[in-house]
Image (spheres, helix red, strand yellow):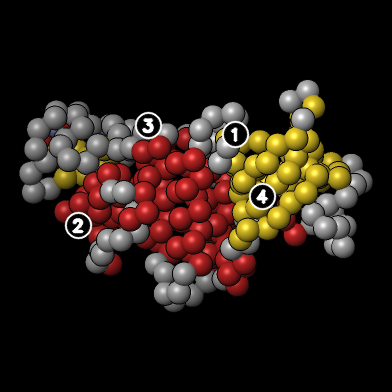
Amino acid sequence: MEDKLTGLVLKNLPIGDTKNLITVLTAERGKKLIACHGARKLTGRNMPATQPFCLCEFIVSEKNNRLTLKESYLIESFFELRCELLDCCVGSYILETGAECAREEEDERELLSLMLNSLHALCSKDHDRVKIKSAFELRLLAIEGSGPVCDVCVCCGKPLGKEFWFSPAEGGTVCGLCRNSGVARAPLYPLDEGARMAMAYILHCPPKRIFSFKLGRRSTQYLETASREALVYTFDKIFESLKFYEQQKDILPEE
Ligand SMILES: [Zn+2]
């Protein structure tokens, strides 16, 4: 049986001498593994379209639920990411977290669209990398059904008041009373009104508008920490690509 799929290459794993196994997030059938023969040869016609970050159309043959690549056509390569190390790191993080969330034979168009929008944003001129990373993290959690509460106190359900914090373990914002009485599980991270409003916006705005918000430097830092910690808590691990991004960020001088 033959099938036509459109998808983003998430991983490319060499198997043996001539075969590669690529992980693709497809619009039609969720996450799929596709075997590629001869795709490692630089002259191979499928070589360019089987690399991570490539959005392609794939013609595959299917036997016993295994897919083998027959033809591939590159739609977009997000090549600009490779020009800047930190953008490339965030791009890899988008692919790694997306690969973790995507399921086989499920409708993952919302996830695919979030990943493509985020990669497009990273390739755009004068982009704000931290903002893109935070918005991606929060929206990913929302798609996974783990979007944090940020309109009331997640512990007591009451309005937040002037001072509030963010608790990944509680899954949202915490009021001063719940913090001081020790009801809210630690750690608690500071948050201001700008960061809280940005968080609410990212979680509920139309998919293509998730980066269309303005935020001051301090609020951006609060948002960066809260979204990172929420994702790490939800997945109960620090993704390798996130570790690498943070190491590189510490080494490189600030832009
Ligand atoms: Zn409370």
Q: Nearer the viewer, residue 4 or 210?
A: 4
247 relative to 150, above or below: below
243 relative to 99, above or below: below
Q: Kindly tell me whether mark 1's CB lies below 8 Å from ligand 1.
A: no
Nearest to N terminus: mark 3 or mark 2? 3
Q: Nearer the viewer, mark 3 or mark 2?
A: 3
Nearest to N terminus: mark 4 or mark 2? 4
Please state the horizontal and vertical placement of residue 207, each as a whole percent of the image.
36, 49
Where disc 2 sits, the SS reads: helix
Nearest to N terminus: mark 3 or mark 1? 1
Give the position of the C terminus as an image quadrant.
bottom left
Residue under circle 3? 145
C-beta proximity under 8 Å, tags 4 and 2: no
Which kind of residue does numbered mark 2 sit on?
A: Gly
Residue under circle 2? 194
Residue in the image at 28% along x and 32% along y: 170
Q: Residues within 10 Å of mark 3 (few under 14, many from 20)?
A: few
Q: Is residue 6 visible?
A: yes
In the drawing, does residue 37 fall left or right of residue 242? right
Where disc 3 sits, the SS reads: loop
Task: Give how far apart the Cα atoms at labels 2 and 1 are.
Answer: 38 Å
